[in-house]
Structure formats: structure tokens, C-alpha cells
Image: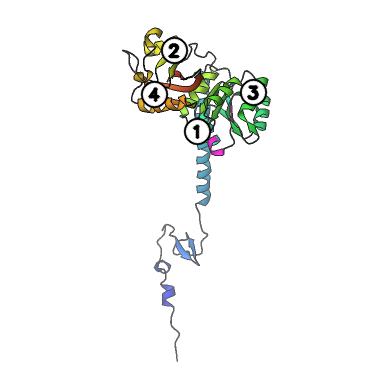
Amino acid sequence: MVRAAFPWPALYHDRRLWHPADPGTPAVPFRRDGQESCSTPDDPGSTPKSGGVRARSESIRSRADELLDRSAALIERSRALRQRIGRPDWPEVAVLNVEDHEPARFLRTRILEGAGYTVKECDSAGDAFEAALGDPSIKLVLLDVGLPDGDGFQLCEQLKAHRADVPVVMITSIYRSATARRQGLDLGADEYLLEPLPGHRLIGTIDRLLMESPPGSKPAIITTDGTGTILALNEPAGRLLNLSVRGAIGRSLLLFVGAERDRVARGLQLAASGQVVQDEMTLVPRERKRFKVEVDLNGSEQSDQSTVEWKIQPL
């Protein structure tokens, strides 16, 4: 007589199946039919238990807490912004961000939201015109010059014709000539900025335009030739340099520039050729402590002499 082999491997596949469990033994996961079970060893048929519901509940609660924290942070930033620009009575300060290039639009929106602004976006001239006229909460328009259905110059002129009280900041990485800048300002733009630019300069420009009581002092303006020799300056510029107007004329403005002198000199050459240059530099006034400034260089043609206008704003 032939006896069939006893299935010892199946019996001993998991030693816990034949090892008796003591009362109170915690559930030990083991596998049956390719699935994991949380049954106790002496009760292999008990119902599987899962922590999935609890995990999902904790995940939802965590996301809700994050949203509440973010909302509170936005409210606080908005309050700080309204105090900063002297507009505590405004419920919000909305900026219309007009840009057809999505990555650039996203970056500007992030910078503005981080400073407390409410941002509304458009990617075409037509949509931007409708939004600016139909939404009274919009306090400023940040306008890209190149748009798919028109150019920013025309849109700026139209916006100023219908809402002259709304500042328009034109921004571009392409139209960098002094002629383009003059055209934008002549059509009503309040500022003309070049990309790339630091986020703090963008925020500082917008803050300044929306302040209830903007700084009353005139900007410091210095006119030089193409090599940096001072030809003319106003009184605010003389105060920055700690020189009288008469004493400043004929000096090289580059001698009042700190460690960035070589870079500023290259920018001066570009400006003299008709380009707009926007930069930051260290100003070293006579017998006073040095400090950081924003500087805009704009070339112009006067008779046969190439001149450059320096607009200097302390940071």
C-alpha cells in the first residue's frame, strides 16, 4: 500500500498557524492568498482591520489646517500692505497682472501675493481692458508690452483715457530702447520697468505709486555725457552727492560709485547708445556714508552730443 505524502510544507509555511496564541496576543499580520491579514494566529478567519480611514481623515485634517494657516497669513500680509501704503480703509489692494507668457505671469503673481497684494490675471489686451474697466477693486495695472492681440502701448493709452486714476506700470524684456520708454511714458505709463528685475524693486515701485501720500521730494536727476562727466543735476541729486550744483558739474559721476563701478560703466555705454539700463549700485557721497540706490540710465540725443540721464532713488 502506498501512502500519500503528508503536506508538511503547507502546514509549516507559517509557524504561527500551529503555534497556539496566548489570551490577549495582539493581532499579527500574516499573508493568506496574497493578501495581508490582521487576524490573530489562532483565529485566521477574523475580519481584516485597516487604518486607511483614519489615515485619510488625518490627511484631510492636515490639509484643512494648512489652508487655514495660509488664509490667516494672506489676511495678515494684506493688513500689513494697507498699513504700509497708508490705505487702511481699502478692503483689498488688487493688481491686474497682464502677461501672455504663463511662467512670467506666475512669477509676478507670486511676488505680488507675497507682498500682500490681491492679484487678478489676464493674458490678452482685450480681456485686460474689460477687467480694468469693469472691476473697481483694481488699483494698478502691471502691463506687459507685447501681447498676442495688441501691444501694451495702445492698451496703456486706452486705459488712461477711461481710468486715469489707475497707475499703469509697463514691464518688458524686449523693448529696451530709450525711444520705447519715452513712448510708454508719453502715452500715460507711470513707470517703465525692464526685466529681469529684483522682486523688491517691483514691490517698491508699486507701493510708491499706491501710497496715499507719496514721497514729496523730487527724484535725483543727473545728466552726464557718454563717459560719465556731470553736465547738469538738480538739487536732490546735489544733496545725494553732498555737493553743490556748481561744485558737481565737470566731475565724473563714476567716481561716486562703489564696487559696481565697472558694471555701471558698461551700463553707461549701453545707455549712451540708446538703450535703457536699470540697475542697483552703491553711491559714495563726499564725506558721507555710502548707501545703496536704484539707478535708471536713459540715453538721449541733444544736438551732436550723446547724453545720459541718471535717475537715482535711494533703496
Give the labeled residue for mark 2: 232
Say few, some or many: other residues with alpha carbon within 10 Å of mark 1 (under 14 / 14 to 19 / 20 or more). Answer: few
Q: Amino acid at mark 3?
A: Glu
Q: Amino acid at mark 1?
A: Asp
CB within 8 Å, label 2 to label 4: no
Identify the residue at the far bottom of this view: 1
Q: CA distance from mark 1 to mark 4?
A: 38 Å
Q: CA distance from mark 3 to mark 1?
A: 41 Å
Q: CA distance from mark 2 to mark 1?
A: 54 Å
Q: In the rendered structure, does residue 97 fall within the stretch colored magenta?
A: yes
Q: Residue at x 45, y 14 (%)?
A: 220
Kind of element beneath mark 3? helix
Q: CA distance from mark 3 to mark 4?
A: 33 Å
Residue 18 sits in which quadrant? Answer: bottom left
Say few, some or many: other residues with alpha carbon within 10 Å of mark 4 (under 14 / 14 to 19 / 20 or more). Answer: many
Give the labeled residue for mark 4: 281
Against 31, is 207 above or below?
above
Q: Amino acid at mark 2?
A: Ala
Q: Nearer the viewer, residue 52 or 175?
A: 175
Against 32, is 300 above or below?
above
Rendered image coloring scheme: rainbow
Which circle, 3 or 1, is nearer the viewer? 3
Q: Is residue 94 left or right of residue 28?
A: right
Report the quarter where the C terminus lies.
top left
Does residue 72 appear anywhere in the picture? no
Dot placed on the residue nearer the N-terminal end, 1 or 4:
1
Q: In the rendered structure, does residue 39 fall within the stretch colored magenta?
A: no
Q: Is residue 293 left or right of residue 168?
A: left
Q: Which disc number belongs to residue 157?
A: 3
The span picked out in magenta is 95-104
Q: Nearer the viewer, residue 114 or 301?
A: 301
